[in-house]
Image (tube, grey):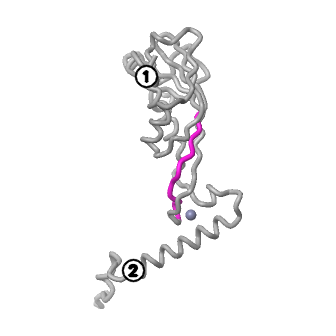
Amino acid sequence: MPLPIVPLDAIPSAGLEVPLGPWARAATEQAFGAENVTGHLHVVRHGVHLVVRGQIALTIQVPCDRCTAQIPLTLQPVVSCVYSPMDAVPERGEDDGADGPALPEGVEAVVDASEYDGVALNLADVVVESLQVEIPPRWLCADAHGDDPGADAACSERFRALSSAVAGKPGDLSPFATLAGWKPAVS
Ligand SMILES: [Zn+2]
């Protein structure tokens, strides 16, 4: 079976253990610019539903939210998701309060639910989506270098240098420059 496309009817009853090989490195290189992905996935079928569990790790380089220096961010999602065919996604109860597809009955101990075409699941998508949701909204030098007590001060220093460079750049007028000579009319 050529990975990462896993056809439903090719999955043995004991499930399929899938190491994250060259296909996963290619997928993360394309999505995140890093191919150091490690981990494994285990795919089990429950009727037409596919349950994917596993552990993934990838370290990417991202700009610090404050000083824009490139800093490492390690993503380590635990994968626990059931994929249902689009036409077989169970109806949600009216007030269960959750978003997205519902969990099929009889498939327990999974965290997320999603859809696939009912024929084959692309594990490259599973890997990339699992990593994407782990990216924090804000990531700073102090987060990336938690064991370095000087990281935060150095980050502040770079931020100040960055701010004054922007403010002092000749010809780079602020959006409010035209208001510099403006005074409120006295009535
Ligand atoms: Zn920083």
**Nearer to us: label 2 or label 1:** 1
- The quarter of the image holding the C terminus is bottom left
Where is residue 30? Give x, y as percent: 42, 41
Q: How many marks?
A: 2
Taking the spot 60% from the left edge, 39% from the top edge, the residue there is 76
Mark 1: secondary structure: strand
Q: Name which quarter of the figure residue 155 lies in.
A: bottom right
Where is residue 142? Give x, y as percent: 63, 60
Quadrant for ligand 1?
A: bottom right
Q: Secondary structure of the magenta portion, mostly?
A: strand
Q: Which residue is mark 1?
A: 5
Where is residue 57? Give x, y as percent: 59, 38
Q: Amino acid at mark 1?
A: Ile
Where is residue 17? Give x, y as percent: 58, 20
Q: Amino acid at mark 2?
A: Lys
Taking the spot 48% from the left edge, 74% from the top edge, the residue there is 163
- Is residue 58 a member of the stretch shown in magenta? yes
**Viewer-nearest residue: 107 or 164:** 164
Q: Name which quarter of the figure residue 182 lies in.
A: bottom left
Taking the spot 44% from the left edge, 20% from the top edge, the residue there is 2
Q: Which residue is mark 2?
A: 169
The magenta segment is: 56-66
Q: Callout 2: few (<14), some (14-19), or many (20+) C-alpha neighbours within 10 Å?
A: few
- Is residue 54 a member of the stretch shown in magenta? no
Mark 2: secondary structure: loop
